[in-house]
Amino acid sequence: MKHALRYTVLWGMLILLLGNVQAAGTGTLSFSSSPRSPDLYLVDSTGQNLRRLVTDKINKHSPTWSPDGRFFAYQSKDDGDPDIYVMDVRNKTSRQLTNHPDRDLSPVWSPNGKWIAFVSDRTGDLDIYRIDVDGSNLIRLTKWGDNKYPAWSPDSQWIAFISSRNEKKFLSVMNADGNKLRQLGDASFKWGGCTWSPDGTQIAFAAWDPEVEGINIFIVDTDGKNKHHLTREEPKDLLFDPKVPLAYQPAWSPDGHCIAYILEYLRVPKPENPQKVQKDRKVIFPLVPRDGVICVTNAVDGGTGKPLLITKELSSDLSPAWVPEPFFPVSPRSQLLSTQWGQLKK
């Protein structure tokens, strides 16, 4: 009897362990296929199970979820200049959170559910603001240079962001009131977002990678130490049609196991004077067409991310965001529609 009980307990423990291994690194991403689209799309981190989240008719971009999964905030230029809105997933209705003649962009919902941080140029420069989720208590948090891509710490006490001053870009951190500002690392070129690890000890961000003459994702400790590569996306077609990698908008999964990001390849025209280009390195920025795809990579080992091919050929404004687990029990099945890729592109 004792042996049977022991085996039963051990078997139960094994099932739990296997269940944890199977669940590790899994999750669901939301993204917008176009700034002109009214709906969001969901896809598993494996690239499977694409479906459309039916909402109202307001165009949506840069979705960010409330911790309970019942709401998401987004930016929309449905009435002219972009403003911030909040969508109730249950009844499929939106309410306008900000209303200003200048641009309000890039909302980010705090993990404690109380605030939404966003970017606005209402004072001339791009600054980060904080507002209560009911639209009250608007606070301007930054007052110098241009400041973009806010990202909340897991405890909602800190905000990481990219700040620009004197043509230099820094990964910076401030507290939720806009005080205790500090810069993490050097002033190397930062581009395209940042995200905290779920344990609050690290920040992933996009930055210039001199090894590939493009943009890759890096990770740094919150004290500014131990900066290292996460992604190592390489250039392609160097002889005939040079393409440099742009890996940006990292989003750390809630379980901490993986990071999603956007990967594009920018076609670089061959210069008449290669030596000049090698010297000033301005060739990466010509405005030419590029393709985008959402990738997912292991948050520890990194390397080259696995592209979710089902998201290929979408606009460059994918804005991937991890969907909170509580979303799924509260979301009626009638609001989630399976979507074929051909339908999504229409």
Image (cartoon, grey):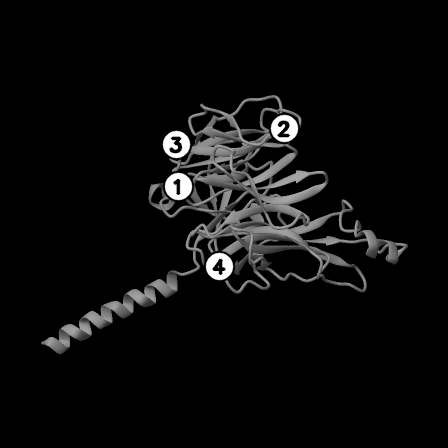
Query: Does residue 212 show up?
Result: yes
Residue receiving disc 4: 46
Mark 3 nearby-residue class (10 Å; few <14, some 14–19, many ≥20):
few
Disc 3 and disc 4: Cα gap in Å? 29 Å
Say which quarter of the image contains residue 155: top left
Disc 2 and disc 4: Cα gap in Å? 37 Å
Amino acid type of disc 3? Asn
Residue receiving disc 2: 121
Per the image, label 2 sits on a secondary structure element best described as loop
Give the camera-side residue of 34 and 203: 203
Image spot of residue 110 (x, y percent): 44, 38
Amino acid type of disc 4? Thr
Give the camera-side residue of 144 and 268: 144
Per the image, label 1 sits on a secondary structure element best described as loop
Image spot of residue 117 (x, y percent): 50, 34
Per the image, label 3 sits on a secondary structure element best described as loop
Mark 4 nearby-residue class (10 Å; few <14, some 14–19, many ≥20):
some
Amino acid type of disc 2? Asp
Disc 3 and disc 2: Cα gap in Å? 32 Å
User: From the viewer's perspective, is 114 left or right of 178?
Assistant: left
